[in-house]
Amino acid sequence: MDTLRVDKFDYSPRINEDFIISPVVSSETLIDNYGFSLVKRLKFDDPYLRLYSQEELNQLRLIETKLSFQSEIRRSRGEWSRKPHTVYVDGDGNYVSKSEKHDWGDPILSDIFFNNILQESVSARSWKKMIPSASALSYFSDPTQSNIVSDKRSIMVDALTKKWWAECTDGEAIRNRNATLNYLVEDYIINHGIKDQPLKWMSLGCGTALPVIKSAVNLGIEPSLILVDKDIDALEQTEILANRLAFNGDIVKFSDINIFNENDMNRLSEKLDAKPKIIDLMGIFEYTGDNIRVNPAKFLRNSYNLLDTDGIMIFGQMLDTRPNLDFALGVVGWPFIHVRSINDLKKIILDAGIDLSKVELFLPSDNVYSVIKIRK
Ligand SMILES: C[S@@+](CC[C@H](N)C(=O)[O-])C[C@H]1O[C@@H](n2cnc3c(N)ncnc32)[C@H](O)[C@@H]1O
């Protein structure tokens, strides 16, 4: 099959990221099954995976898969610390019990992984403490980072931890998710002929906004970014990143908006001088649902209401069929994630009152996330 496009991510002095999207396959069967206007499978060639040999990659993935199976068995026996469907933030986004926040997942296998397999790595254990913050995610996006800040101390990242960030299933999936965002935004600006025109891009639950800023720099655009996140530390990092990556657009930040609260979203709407043409909700949708008592359809609707006519909204959703699920949720311990099927997503979109003819589905070949684009 033909290579359709080559995306260059050459923003970083450490590594040139040549994500080759090859090929982009439309699937008629999936379109028929789900009723979306478009379904595409995306295949990426992730340069970070090529930093190590195929044998090393296979070995690491085998360890993940074995631990994942063991953890799944332990979960089904009720041997995890907390079961899914227990609440940790209320409807206003406040933690119900901070002390319980880290008490999640499979303590036994987590201990084996971090202490035996990762050899009591100080950097890996410091990183685990950062979960589920967006800062933790940034090490998957850029696994070559050499320092980690924990308890206000800077810790050198060891080679084993770096290798694991680069090669693990979720590292690959996060980078592919970011590359999909980049691909969809590029497609939008090309199709609308707006490369050199003003563009408003809002990121809800932006975290450090690493994927957004990288993408803008990579595409040579200077959008006005509206960044919304309750994590003030992550929002502070956006400035540092923007400087480091030589982002020249302007940035407006909101830390006082709970994106799951309808009144807050209305308040946000009133503060905008114009509606954004692009809204991304990357990395937040799988947290909605019973675990944090947030209705995903309402959240989708409220976010869609903020979008300008002719704009696009982009969000990811971790799939229930993803590989190494129990490794990610139990052993590493990403808490309160709602995995969903494509049919679940379809139902949520319909419940949000959005017509399926406006919806496009993208499926990166790592099979961890689906990425949805909704036009307005
Ligand atoms: C997994 S991170 C995703 C970060 C980024 N979008 C990315 O793709 O790398 C989710 C972010 O959503 C933020 N968040 C979670 N609940 C929120 C809420 N109710 N209001 C505002 N931000 C929230 C978190 O602080 C976190 O930074």
Image: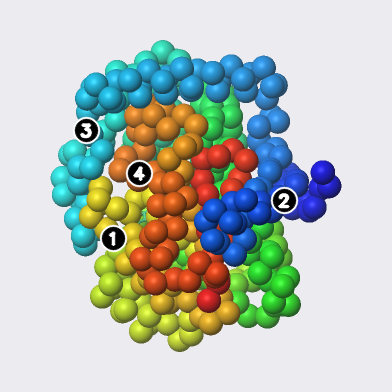
Q: What SS does tag 2 mark? A: strand
Q: What SS does tag 3 mark? A: loop
Instruction: Kindly report which numbered mark, 1 or 4, lies closer to the viewer in this rendering.
Output: 1
Tell me the distance, in whole angstroms, between the alpha carbons under discs 4 and 2.
Answer: 28 Å
Quarter of the view holding residue 112: top left
Tell me which residue sits at (37%, 68%) in the image.
Answer: 352
> Can you identify the residue that label 2 sits on?
24
Instruction: Kindly report which numbered mark, 4 or 2, lies closer to the viewer in this rendering.
Output: 2
Tell me the distance, in whole angstroms, between the alpha carbons under discs 2 and 3.
Answer: 40 Å
The residue lying toward the viewer, choosing from 181 and 102, is 181
> Can you identify the residue that label 4 sits on?
337
Q: What SS does tag 4 mark? A: loop
Residue 280: x %, y % from top left: 50, 63
**Image mark for residue 52:** none
**Image mark for residue 295:** 1
Dot placed on the residue nearer the N-terminal end, 4 or 3: 3
Q: Residues within 10 Å of mark 2 (few under 14, many from 20)?
A: many
> Can you identify the residue that label 3 sits on?
82
Tell me the distance, in whole angstroms, between the alpha carbons under discs 1 and 4.
Answer: 14 Å
The residue lying toward the viewer, choosing from 24 and 91, is 24
Dot placed on the residue nearer the N-terminal end, 2 or 3: 2
Can residue 271 be seen from the camera position used here?
A: yes
Q: Of the residues shown, which amino acid type is indicated by label 3?
A: Arg
Tell me which residue sits at (26%, 33%) in the image.
Answer: 104
Compared across the picture, whether 137 is left or right of 211 comes to left
Q: Of the residues shown, which amino acid type is indicated by label 4?
A: Ile
Residue 312: x %, y % from top left: 55, 70
